[in-house]
Amino acid sequence: QVQLVESGGGLVQPGGSLRLSCAASGTIFWFNAMAWYRQAPGKERELVASIRSGGITNYLDSVKGRFTISRDNAKIAVYLQMNSLESEDTAVYYCYAEKLVVGRGTVNYWGQGTQVTVSS
């Protein structure tokens, strides 16, 4: 059983920084892609940033230049460094990972979510 465990959320003032971490546990050696999604109250879940196995990254336009996604393949972990946080960044942040399985296609995994609140 593969699980994604997030940490690093919390309350921060506007302009502050937070670093989210997500580590995989269980029998897993590799993910093709890892990402962070977020969901604010009353809104749909949206992709914040993703990173593929080759290191190619993709960001939501509103976080470009402020957020940085990175991964540690040895630890099977993904991180999200969030700087210059704004109140609009307040949401539950979810870790996501996927791998290709022969005969099954893409298998997706989700973390339980971690709350990020940006408020003065």
Image: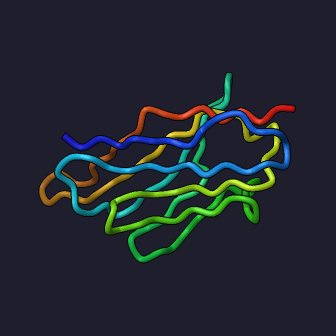
Quadrant in the picture for the C terminus: top right
Q: Nearer the viewer, residue 105 or 37?
A: 37
Return the residue nearer the eye: 115 or 88. 115
Which residue corresponds to the image point at 23% horizontal and 54% vertical from the top-left? 105
Q: Percent position (x, y) of residue 18?
A: 67, 49
Q: Is residue 23 left or right of residue 50?
A: left
The image shows residue 22 at horizontal and vertical percentages of: 44, 49
Residue occupying the far bottom of the picture: 54
Determine whether, in the image, residue 28 is placed left or right of residue 81: left
The relative height of residue 80 versus residue 72 in the rendered view (above or below) is above
Vertical comparison of 38 with 23: above or below: above
Q: Residue 8: give x, y in percent of width and height.
A: 56, 43
Instruction: Decide if residue 28 is on the left or right side of residue 17.
Output: left
Residue at the spot 34% in from the left edge and 60% down from the top edge = 76
Provide residue 88's location: percent of width, then percent of height: 79, 38
Check the picture and name the quadrant holding the N terminus.
top left
- Who is closer to the viewer here, 51 or 42? 51
- Residue ranking furthest to the top: 42
**Within the image, what quadrant is residue 53 found in?**
bottom left
| Rendering quarter of residue 9 | top right
